[in-house]
């Protein structure tokens, strides 16, 4: 069975092989990606000729047709006596910051999918709260470096570390303002040990933010990477969820303590991965996208569950007094929850639906559109997203509400918050945004890595100019030696579909 991601293997499981030999073995067994751990013995990021080595490796990887992710979990690179130290939560983290900045430079040269990193174990002389502050400050600085270099960072939850679960990683990202350059790495084995909802829940929670997957087995009792079948990981279920969420990155085997048997384990691991990907799909309460790709331009409609009782009361309140909307908007997440309502990329959340209902009620009751402008301008990212979802719920907005909605959609499309941009290209934008702004919004989705399935009306509105813009963008990427997002192909296919219907 074909998969949308790329099978890879970590070089930390090939420490008895020179890097070229390791790559030869991996290619022989069918891997098309490598997870490169910086440090001994394969690529010393602090060697005098690190740049020359990296440039030569980039040429070799392109020749071989191998994707690459950069891993930073080397054990004793920074301190010969203390494993992994210092970390991002130590009081003094200068060497770690230097290392991660060098990793970003290397990733840019290699055109790597991402740089994977973790928080670290909280040391005895740092409180948990202080560790959060240190981590946030340092990640903010690193994400700025990553943006400047055109590189994505992926924060990996690790058992025993400050960031231990996917929920912890998402909380960090929220505290930092949802930086687009910061995604998530998930190690499937770790999910067996620490994730309260197991591997299925962890992968769904990561969703569209998932940038990197490490694959190994584990037992619930120990953080020990094991070959597939030696632990309790439900590998078929994990791969089924990767299909559901539309994951297209690298899935790399990580067996850092098994270099003595690397060639045989590379063979056996590939066999296990292929068998699991072909196993009849287990029942994991999948969403509406189960079983295949979604056609481009699927309407980004809000789910229509039975309204939460709090939402019903909030709608009644704003219909009689629009001034109550601000307080209700701010408390929606606390009252109804913030969970996504489906596993689809950028799915509406429970609070999105409640806020959308409030916006629709304001419009239907004839409230001044300045009310919704204020909700957006004064709101946080989640509240702004709720406004945009609410615009999608307006079947026939008045001229004043249409003008306000267009103003807010255009503002959201200037942002780099992927969830805000995705919400901005819903049904309201499809119906009312002018061609120029809409085309640029679609292309911004491609640039930010937002799946085009979230764009409402893509098949209906795509035209030759949009296809030409996509082609120019792809050519620029190729000329710069960078990968071309697969979703660009949807632009030409959507145009073909439109022309066929018109004929």
Image (tube, rainbow, N blue to C red):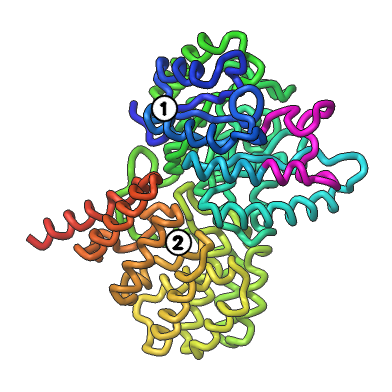
- Residue 159 quadrant: top right
**On the image, numbered disc 2 is attached to which residue?**
422
In this rendering, is residue 200 above or below 353?
A: above
Question: In the shown orientation, is residue 473 left or right of residue 222?
Answer: left
Question: In the shown orientation, is residue 380 left or right of residue 209?
Answer: right
**Residue 32: assigned label:** 1
Q: Position of residue 379 (x, y in %)?
A: 61, 74
Residue extending farthest to the right is 125
SS at badge 1: loop
Q: Which residues are magenta?
A: 72-99
Q: Position of residue 111 (x, y in %)?
A: 47, 42
Looking at the image, which is closer to me, 1 or 93? 93
Residue 441 visible? The answer is yes
Image quarter hosting the N terminus: top left
Look at 53% across and 62% down and name the residue there. 417
Look at 72% across and 25% down and name the residue there. 223
In this rendering, is residue 268 above or below 81?
A: above
């Amino acid at each position: 069975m074909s998969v949308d991601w790329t099978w890879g293997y970590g070089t930390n499981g090939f420490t008895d092989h020179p890097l070229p030999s390791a790559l030869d073995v991996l290619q022989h067994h069918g891997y098309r990606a490598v997870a490169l751990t910086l440090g001994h013995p394969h690529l010393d990021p602090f060697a005098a000729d690190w740049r020359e080595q990296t440039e030569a490796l980039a040429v070799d990887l392109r020749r071989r047709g191998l994707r690459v992710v950069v891993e930073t979990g080397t054990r004793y690179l920074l301190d010969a006596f203390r494993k992994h130290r210092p970390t991002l939560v130590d009081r003094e983290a200068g060497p770690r910051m230097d290392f991660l900045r060098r990793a970003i430079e290397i990733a840019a040269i290699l055109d790597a999918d991402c740089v994977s990193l973790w928080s670290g174990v909280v040391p005895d002389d740092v409180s948990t709260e202080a560790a959060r502050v240190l981590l946030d400050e340092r990640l903010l600085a690193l994400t700025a470096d990553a943006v400047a270099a055109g590189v994505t960072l992926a924060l990996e939850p690790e058992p025993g570390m400050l960031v231990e679960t996917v929920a912890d990683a998402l909380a960090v990202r929220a505290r930092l303002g949802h930086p687009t350059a910061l995604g998530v790495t998930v190690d499937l084995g770790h999910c067996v040990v620490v994730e309260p909802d197991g591997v299925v829940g962890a992968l769904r929670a990561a969703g569209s933010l998932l940038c990197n997957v490490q694959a190994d087995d584990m037992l619930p009792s120990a953080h020990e990477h094991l070959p597939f079948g030696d632990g309790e990981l439900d590998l078929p279920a994990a791969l089924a969820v990767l299909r559901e969420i539309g994951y297209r990155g690298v899935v790399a085997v990580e067996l850092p303590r098994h270099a003595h048997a690397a060639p045989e384990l590379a063979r056996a691991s590939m066999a296990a991965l292929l068998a699991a990907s072909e196993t009849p799909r287990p029942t994991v309460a999948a969403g509406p996208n189960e079983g295949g790709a979604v056609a481009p331009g699927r309407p980004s409609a809000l789910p229509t569950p039975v309204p939460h009782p709090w939402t019903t009361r909030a709608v009644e309140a704003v219909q009689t007094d629009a001034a109550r909307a601000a307080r209700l908007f701010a408390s929606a997440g606390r009252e109804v929850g913030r969970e996504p309502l489906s596993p689809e990329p950028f799915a509406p959340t429970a609070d999105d639906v409640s806020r959308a209902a409030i916006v629709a009620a304001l419009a239907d009751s004839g409230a001044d559109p300045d009310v919704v402008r204020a909700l957006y301008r004064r709101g946080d990212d989640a509240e702004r997203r709720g406004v945009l979802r609410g615009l999608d719920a307006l079947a026939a907005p008045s001229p004043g509400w249409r003008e306000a909605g267009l103003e807010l959609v255009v503002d959201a499309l200037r942002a780099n918050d992927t969830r805000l941009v995705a919400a901005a290209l819903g049904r309201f934008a499809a119906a009312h945004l002018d061609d120029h702004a809409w085309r640029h919004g679609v292309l911004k989705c491609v640039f930010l890595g937002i799946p085009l399935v979230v764009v409402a009306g893509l098949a209906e509105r795509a035209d030759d100019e949009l296809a030409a813009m996509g082609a120019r963008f792809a050519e620029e990427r190729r000329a710069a030696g960078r990968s071309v997002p697969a979703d660009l192909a949807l632009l030409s296919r959507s145009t073909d579909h439109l022309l066929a219907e018109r004929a």
